[in-house]
Image (cartoon, rainbow, N blue to C red):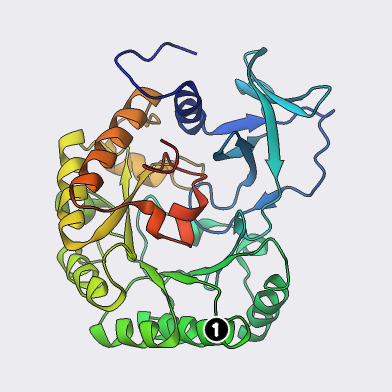
Amino acid sequence: MPTIINMQSSKDIIIKAHLLSEGTIYLPPNIHLPFPVCRSTAGPGAGAKMLTLTFRHHTVKLQISPDQNTPLWLDHTADGYQLLRNGSPILNSLIPVYVPFHAPNQLFLNIEPKCIHNCRFCTQNYLPPHITTTGSHKKITHMLLQGLQTPQIHAVAFTAGIYPNTQEITHKMVALTQLVKHHHPTTPVGVETYINSDTELHHLQKSGVDEIKINLQLPTSELFSQFCPTLDYEFIKTMLQKAVTHFGKGKVCSNIIYGLGERNEELYDAITELAEMGVVTTLRKLTITPNNIQRISEITKKPLKSPDAQRIITLAQRHKTILSHYNLTPKTFSTMCHRCGCCDIIPFVDF
């Protein structure tokens, strides 16, 4: 791997940043995992087969590629697994992790695969029906109650597309949260959703939701208007501010995606603005897939390239500095992406 200069990050952080930048891994035919490969219906790489790996105290999720020319390969060793890049070992003592519910040690369910919004980077409305079919409320409830019996599950989270409207999604999340709290009152619950009113926030908080993610998605209103034309950028900020009054500082988070032509300074400004509210940003690298590449390219008018490891680490370091200034940390979260850590470099967790 190329050397990253002027960095104080450990070797492991540099490796994780490279893995996130490359994003895909090839599993040779001789590799037999001790569990079935999982597929997510939301988040980065939605619809693709994914492999989650841990090394030391770091976790990363990579999309499984059928192309044997993919630089990253998983390989067997006498003691387990190692990671190869272009045939050379770069990481030993890897542990593949079974993630049946989207995130390690969490029951993270996508309760609605359809969405009335059509953000250009999102793949949710473009996945095959056999992948996205979530099922009836009865089926979701059955999955939830069964999953809660798994000893490794320590938290529950719900995400959803918005269909037919935010009120209906809020109603479903309230009912499911009440079910969790009835059977497992101490299990933390997080929700990732859009919000249309203070009343919806109130209902979620009263139902027992502990943490909430409302995604601002992009660092500037200009990019937002291009990629999320049916949503209101300033209104989302208002709902984030109101969410902090309901759930508290350090219990509200928001995705900001990078890799769409923004400047680093624009990202820092957005992270700072949210931190001033008490909101912890999830800084999320753009994932390019066959389901979104054309729609994104129609806007960017140029070839898409994944952010490199140098930029990923530079952003993560500044992210940590900003959060520190506002006495915020992702470690206050027990659910969702900050607890998972598979798709991002998480300040205070990874380094």
The x and y percentages for residue 99 are 66, 53
* Residue 325 relative to residue 89: left or right: left
Q: Depth check: give the residue in front, 222 or 248.
A: 248
* Residue 16 relative to residue 94: left or right: left
* Mark 1 burial class by Cα count in 10 Å: few <14, some 14-19, many 20+: some
The x and y percentages for residue 21 are 45, 30
Q: Residue at x 48, y 33 (%)?
A: 20
Q: Depth check: give the residue in front, 279 or 308.
A: 279
So how many labels did they put on this image? 1
Asked where in the image residue 308 lies, by quadrant, the reply is top left
Q: Is residue 28 above or below residue 254?
A: above
Q: Residue at x 71, y 50 (%)?
A: 98
Q: Residue at x 25, y 66 (%)?
A: 231
Q: Amino acid at mark 1?
A: Lys
**Does dot 1 land on a helix, a strand or a loop?**
helix
Q: Which residue is mark 1?
A: 181
User: Is residue 287 visible to us here?
Assistant: yes
The x and y percentages for residue 31 are 81, 31
The x and y percentages for residue 207 are 44, 87
Q: Is residue 223 above or below residue 58?
A: below
Asked where in the image residue 248 lies, by quadrant, the reply is bottom left
Q: Residue at x 38, y 50 (%)?
A: 121
* Residue 333 relative to residue 156: left or right: left
User: Is residue 66 visible to us here?
Assistant: no
| Quarter of the image that includes the C terminus | top left
* Residue 175 relative to residue 120: left or right: right
Asked where in the image residue 287 lies, by quadrant, the reply is top left
Q: Is residue 123 above or below residue 342?
A: below
